[in-house]
Amino acid sequence: MLDEVRALLILQDRDRRLLALAKDLERLPQDEARAKNKLAGDEAAVKKAHDALVDCELRLKRLELDAGTRRTTIQRLKVQQYETRKNEEYQALGHEITRYEKEADDLETRELELMEEMDGLRAAQKAAEAALAHTRTLVDEDLATIVRRRERMEAERAELVTERDQLAAGVSESVLPLYQRLMKTKDGMAIAPMHEGKCGGCHMKLIASTVVAVQNAKEMTRCEDCGRILYAEE
Ligand SMILES: [Zn+2]
């Protein structure tokens, strides 16, 4: 292999690693978003449990008010009943009092049921909050892992950039622009191995004189089809 091609091959290896790193770094924000998304379901469950509890509290308050109104009415009717001198009115008031007492009792029974329901809803809310806290711990761990991964990749990238700049400085100025152009236009592969008479980049069969030239390695030879710089696999 030509020394120049060997040097380019090392440079290409570092450049390809840099490209892969850049891709991995680009993916990190998506990984972060995915981790944070795991919280959404649990947060919604906490909100739902909270809303159900608030709704139950409201219903209970309404019942308490209704029962209170009945009790006030009963008091008023009892005073009326005490003050009346007419037997008929006395009895009519008595029926009304019984009716209101029945209603008030029913409302109080319903209050007790709602209080029980509230206990259940409070427990459900606690459970939902515990589940959210657990998920949050896991998500925080995931996010911390992503931060460490980013730091590691950025350190690796800084090292690689230094190394690739040194390697590029050692490549002759007549070849470097061609290499860089091919890296950009040929999918990050400027230097390709020749394999069984075919270009390892575009996989086209090479003409015989090109195959021989690559094998002789006396001068830089390019694929006549895609233009990549070729080397014979050793
Ligand atoms: Zn080719």
Image (cartoon, helix red, strand yellow):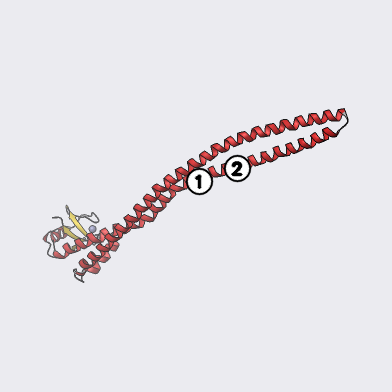
Amino acid type, residue under disc 1 in the picture: Ala
Of marks 1 and 2, the one in the foreground: 2
- The residue at 46%/43% (across/down) is 130
Q: Residue 185, position in %: x, y?
A: 29, 62
Task: Say which mark, if any, is on residue 44.
Answer: 1
**Which quadrant: the C terminus?**
bottom left
Amino acid type, residue under disc 2 in the picture: Asp
- The residue at 65%/32% (across/down) is 109
Q: Quadrant of ligand 1?
A: bottom left
Does 200 appear above or below 48?
Answer: below
Q: Nearer the viewer, residue 45 or 5?
A: 45
Is the distance from the Cβ of mark 2 to the nearest ligand 1 atom less than 8 Å?
A: no
Direction from residue 123 to residue 112 in the image, left or right:
right
Does 76 appear above or below 27?
Answer: above
Tell me how far mark 1 sits from mark 2, CA to CA. Answer: 16 Å
**Residue to which mark 2 is pinned:** 55
**Which quadrant: the N terminus?**
bottom left
Q: Label 2: state its secondary structure.
A: helix
Q: Residue furthest right?
A: 86
Q: Residue 9, position in %: x, y?
A: 19, 61
Q: Label 1: state its secondary structure.
A: helix
Circle 2 Cα neighbour tier, 10 Å, few/some/many (<14 / 14–19 / ≥20): few
